[in-house]
Amino acid sequence: MRVMVLVKADKDSEAGIMPSGDILTKMGAYNEELVKAGVMLAGDGLHPSSKGIRMRFSGSERVITDGPFAEAKELLCGFWIWQVKSFDEAVEWLKRAPFDGGTEIELRRIFEMEDFGEALTPELRAQEERIQAGAAKLAG
């Protein structure tokens, strides 16, 4: 099972304030532990929304809105993708994360091909496998 761990933004991350050396050290140790356990597939921090855009799709129209965006608590400042045996295992790993001070994290399962049932035809399955193989090559 793969899960995505979504780290919610706060006023500091939205202001572009970088974490302290102490926090970076603790997070580095935690990430190393995740990698050694075979859990962490990917993870990164995100620049503040002031450096991003939102695009709204309406038929063939594309409307772009430049950041920053209101409501920091609804924004993301980082993520992980984990491979775990169960959702409970992901929760246990998340409990060990070196966060404090009101940080909010969202944990969500990632759809696997099996989740789509009969709608995933053999042709769509083959296409998805080609896409995943190509993406894995790019990731190196």
Image (cartoon, rainbow, N blue to C red):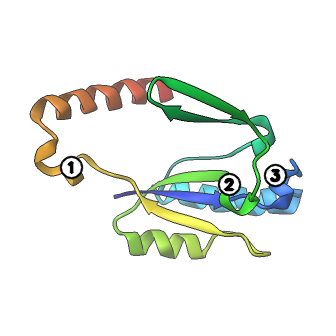
Tell me residue 62's x, y (percent).
Answer: 56, 26
Is 126 or 139 nearer to us in this picture?
126
Q: Which residue is mark 3?
A: 14
Local secondary structure at mark 3: helix
Q: Earlier in the sequence, mark 1 or mark 3?
A: 3
Residue 116 tag number: 1
Q: Is residue 138 left or right of residue 25?
A: left
Residue at 69% across / 60% down in the picture?
29
Is 24 or 18 nearer to us in this picture?
18
Q: Is residue 125 above or below residue 74?
A: above
Quadrant where the image shows the N terminus: bottom left
Q: Mark 2 is on which residue type?
A: Leu
Tell me residue 91's x, y (percent).
Answer: 49, 73
Q: In this view of the protein, can residue 140 be seen by the observer?
A: no
Residue 75 tag number: 2
Q: Residues within 10 Å of mark 2 (few under 14, many from 20)?
A: some
Tell me residue 39's x, y (percent).
Answer: 47, 57
Pointers 3 and 2 in contact (C-beta within 8 Å): yes
Q: CA distance from mark 2 to mark 1?
A: 28 Å
